[in-house]
Amino acid sequence: MDGNSMPPDSHPKPGRVGLDWTRAQDFLAREREAYTRENPRSAELAAQASQHLLFGVPLHWMNDWGTPFALHVQDARGVRLTDVDGHERVDFCLGDTGAMFGHAPPAVANALKAQADRGYTTMLATSDAAEVGRLLSERFGLPFWQFAMSATDANRYIVRWIRAATGRKTILVFNGCYHGTIEDVFVDLVDGRPVQRDSLLGQVHDLTQHTRVVEFNDLPALEAALSAGDVACVLAEPVMTNIGMVLPAPGFWAEAQRIVRRHGALLVMDETHTISTGPGGYAQAHGISPDALVLGKPVGGGVPCAVYGMSTDLAARAVRAKQEAPPGHSGIGTTLTGNMLAMAAMRAALSEVMTAQAYGHMLPLAERLAHGLRTLLARHRLPWCVTQVGARVEFQFCPTPPRNGSEADAVLDGELEHLIHLGLLNRGVLITPFHNMMLVSPVTTDEDVAALLAALDAVLSEITPRR
C-alpha cells in the first residue's frame, strides 16, 4: 500500500494528497491509547455522565472532538484550560468564539460578581441596559437594539420582525450557511435544487416553501432568487465561517447590496463569528451597510446573551407592526431575555474587553500565526491553504480558498480533522473541533502561537511520508 492508499472501505478525500494514510491510521491508534491512558478522571466522569446524560454529554456535539471519551474541564482562564486530570492546555478554540476575548475576562468577572448580590433576573429594565444600547449604537452604527439569549434566538427574532414589517414570508440564505439552529436556514443546494438538510432532526414543515438558497459569491443567482420581489431579507455572514471559511470575492458585497435593495429585500449581517475582524465587525470594516445586525456569543464575554440591531426605518416598521397586531404573545423573547446578569456582562465586555486596544494585539498576532501555518504546510509539502478573517485563522484541505459552500463542503474531512485535533490536544493545544479554526485572543502570546505551530509540526511529521 503506497503513501496515499486508503483502507478498502474508505473513499479518497482531496485533502489526503501528500499524506501517508497508513502512517496516519497508526498514529491515530497511538493517540487514542495515549489519551485514554493520560485522562483517567475524565474517563470516570464520562462513564458516570453516560448513565443520565443523553450521549453522555450536556449536548451531543460535545462528542465531536475525536476523543475516545469527553474531556472534562476543571478551570478555564485566559487561554489556559485545566482538565480534571490536571493537564493544562493552550486554547485556540475559545468556546468556538464564545470566549474569543479569553476565558473569564477580569472586567466581566468583576461585573458578574458585583451584580450577583443585586439580583439575576426581574423582567424589568436596568441602567446597564440603557448603556449597552448606547454602546452598541455607537459601535455598529445602527440606532435601535434588542436582546436575546443566543445568536440563534437573535436570528430567529430578527427574521420574525422583518417578516412582520415587510409582509413578506420568504428569506434567502447562502448554501452551507449556519446561523445557529433557527429552522429556516437549514436548506441546502443539492445538484442545483433546494433541499431541506437531511441531518435536521424532527422537522415536520417543508422549509423550502419559505427559504431560498443560492451559492455565496454568485451574483446572477442572487439576482434571480430576488427577482420575484417576495423576499423579506437576506440573512448572511459577511464571510461564511461554519463550513470552513469562504471569503467574499472582490466587489461581491458592494454589488450584492445593490441587488438586495433593488428588489426591496432587507440585509441582515450575522457577525457572531466575524466580529473577529475588528471592534465594529466585518461589515463596518468593509463598507457593508446592513439593515440589521446580529451578534451572539462573544458580546457578553461568554455569558449566554446576544443582541440584534435595526436601522431607523426597520425599527419604525417593526414598532408599527407590533402596534397593529392583535394583543398576545409575539413569539419574540423569553423570560430570561435581557436579564440583569447578561446586561452587566455585556456592559463590561463592550466597554472594557472588546476594545480597539485588544484588537491591536489580536490582529498582528493572528497574522503571525497565519504566516507560520503557511510556512509549516509548505515545509511538509501539503497542498492546503490558510484563510484569515481578523483574529480568526483556519487551514483548509485544498490549495486555494473555496469560493462557496459547495466547494468548502467538498474538502471537509471529519476523519482527518479528528486525527489532527486529537494529536494537538495530546500535545497541549486545542483548536475548534468542527474544522480547523483557531482564534487569537487579547491574552494569547507569541509563545502560545509557537506552541501551536510546534504541536502541529509534530502531528504532520507523523502523518506525512518519511523523508
Image: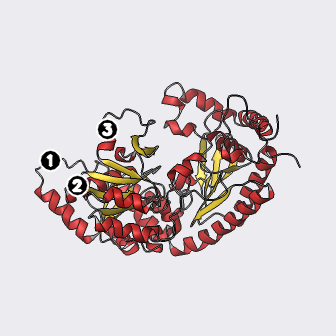
Q: Which mark is residue 206?
A: 3
Percent of width and height locating residue 187: 40, 44
**Cα–Cα gap, marks 2 and 3:** 17 Å
Give the residue type at disc 3.
Asp
Left of 368 or right of it: where is 129? left
Give the residue type at disc 1.
Gly
Percent of width and height locating residue 54: 48, 29
* Colour treatment of the image: secondary structure
- Residue displayed at 72% across by 55% down: 383
> Which quadrant of the rendered structure holds the N terminus?
top right
Q: Residues within 10 Å of mark 1 (few under 14, many from 20)?
A: few
**Cα–Cα gap, marks 2 and 1:** 21 Å
Name the residue that disc number 2 marks: 168
Give the residue type at disc 2.
Arg
Is 141 above or below relative to 230? Answer: below
Q: Nearer the viewer, mark 2 or mark 1?
A: 2
Q: Which mark is residue 103?
A: none
Mark toward the start of the polypeptide (2 vs 1): 2
Left of 338 or right of it: where is 200? right
Left of 458 or right of it: where is 175? left
Mark toward the start of the polypeptide (2 vs 3): 2
Asked which quadrant contains residue 202, the reply is top left
